[in-house]
Image (cartoon, helix red, strand yellow):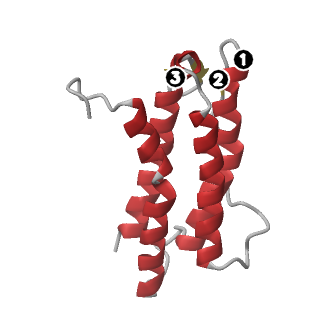
Amino acid sequence: MTASSEPTRSETVSAFANGPDRIGELARARAATGAPNPAGGWGPPEILRHLIAVEQEVWWIRLPSLAREEEPQWSWTEPGLEPGLEGASLDELIARFAEVRGRSVAIVAGFDEATWTKTGIHATYGRLDAAGLLRIATDHDDEHARSLAAD
């Protein structure tokens, strides 16, 4: 981090890009234990299917809107599980999450400085720039990482 304790653009993008590796490692470790899903909770396959859906339904919409729209407006969106992946193996789900996250990283990599600092308005979080969106995405990854690491 920089002296101001705010992460740099590179650090923010890197944390976002590393989500699939972190989640994949935790998902494999959790699955290897054979532990049941927490009551009412998701196991590794469901978490990965959810993260795949979030990537496509949230980040693939919000990130490009910063480049396309004057001041994008975003509502709260809570995707469920990505359909069509019910029989996919854990490795297939991890690879798919890495693939869709890679597309999101590519979107952000194409941002010039003006797009990186441009803001939109989220109905819950208020005014956000690209870094703010990526921090929310990384926090969401962290939330699911914690559930995978829980006993």
Mark 3 and mark 1 lie on one chain; the one further toward the N terminus is 1
Tell me: residue 114, above or below residue 137: above
The reply to whether the C-beta atoms of the residues labelled 2 and 3 are less than 8 Å apart is: yes
Mark 2 and mark 3 lie on one chain; the one further toward the N terminus is 2
User: Which disc number belongs to residue 69?
Assistant: 1
- Which SS class for mark 2? helix
Tell me the kind of residue under disc 2.
Leu
Q: The C terminus lies in which quarter of the figure?
A: bottom left
Distance Cα–Cα, label 2 vs label 1: 6 Å
Crowdedness near tag 2: few (<14), some (14–19) or many (≥20) residues, C-alpha within 10 Å: many
Tell me: residue 116, above or below residue 146: above
For the question of whether residue 79 can be seen, the reply is no
Tell me: residue 53, above or below residue 12: below
Q: In this view, does 128 lie to the left or right of 54?
A: left
Crowdedness near tag 1: few (<14), some (14–19) or many (≥20) residues, C-alpha within 10 Å: few
Which residue is located at x 59 percent, y 59 percent? Answer: 98
Name the residue tied to disc 3: 129
Q: Is residue 119 left or right of residue 149?
A: right
Distance Cα–Cα, label 2 vs label 3: 8 Å
The reply to whether the C-beta atoms of the residues labelled 2 and 1 are less than 8 Å apart is: yes
Which residue is located at x 51 percent, y 59 percent? Answer: 20
The percent position of residue 149, horizontal first and vertical second, equals 36, 68
Tell me the kind of residue under disc 1.
Glu
Name the residue tied to disc 2: 66
Which residue is located at x 52 percent, y 23 percent? Answer: 129
Distance Cα–Cα, label 3 vs label 1: 13 Å
Q: The N terminus lies in which quarter of the figure?
A: top left
For the question of whether residue 99 can be seen, the reply is yes
Crowdedness near tag 3: few (<14), some (14–19) or many (≥20) residues, C-alpha within 10 Å: some
